[in-house]
Image: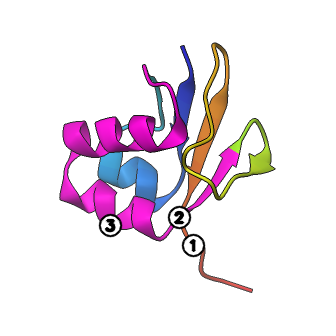
Amino acid sequence: MPTLRYFAAAAEAAGTAQETVIGADVAGVLADAVDRHGPRLAHVVAHSSLLLDGRYVQDRNVSLAEGDVLDVLPPFAGG
């Protein structure tokens, strides 16, 4: 199963830093996470960058495989 990792505001909204998920693609995994964790996570995810196994992913229809790691990185303040 893929692993979904949350950082900063995403971890706060989800109430966890990491969870194992079931899903065929990025969109499905994120939709399931939002269903479980609520609208606050939906807001964060909508403004976040996504990394799949360390590589930026923009297409949410990308398939996920056993052992994949999807990171949710909200915008960070600072400079």
Q: Which residue corresponds to the image point at 56% horizontal and 21% vertical from the top-left?
A: 2
Dot 1 falls on a residue whose secondary structure is loop
In contact (CB < 8 Å): disc 1 and disc 2: yes
In contact (CB < 8 Å): disc 3 and disc 2: no
Q: Which residue is mark 2?
A: 48
Dot 3 falls on a residue whose secondary structure is helix
Q: Is residue 76 found inside the magenta-colored segment of the image? A: no
Dot 2 falls on a residue whose secondary structure is loop
Q: Is residue 15 visible?
A: no
**Magenta residues, start to end:** 22-51
Separation (CA) of disc 3 from disc 2: 9 Å
In the displayed structure, would residue 25 be above or below residue 37? above
Q: Which residue is mark 3?
A: 43
| Dot placed on the residue nearer the N-terminal end, 3 or 2 | 3
Disc 3 residue type?
A: His
Q: Which residue corresponds to the image point at 61% horizontal and 44% vertical from the top-left?
A: 71
- In the foreground, 69 or 28: 28
Local crowd at mark 3 within 10 Å, few (<14), some, or many (≥20)? some
Q: Position of residue 25 (x, y in %)?
A: 52, 33
Disc 2 residue type?
A: Ser
Left or right: residue 14 versus residue 66 is: left
Q: Position of residue 31 (x, y in %)?
A: 33, 43
Tell which residue pokes out farthest to the front in this image: 61
Q: Which residue is mark 1?
A: 75
Separation (CA) of disc 1 from disc 2: 6 Å
Hey, which quadrant is residue 27 in on the image? top left
In the displayed structure, would residue 76 be above or below residue 24? below
| Dot placed on the residue nearer the N-terminal end, 1 or 2 | 2
- In the foreground, 63 or 73: 63
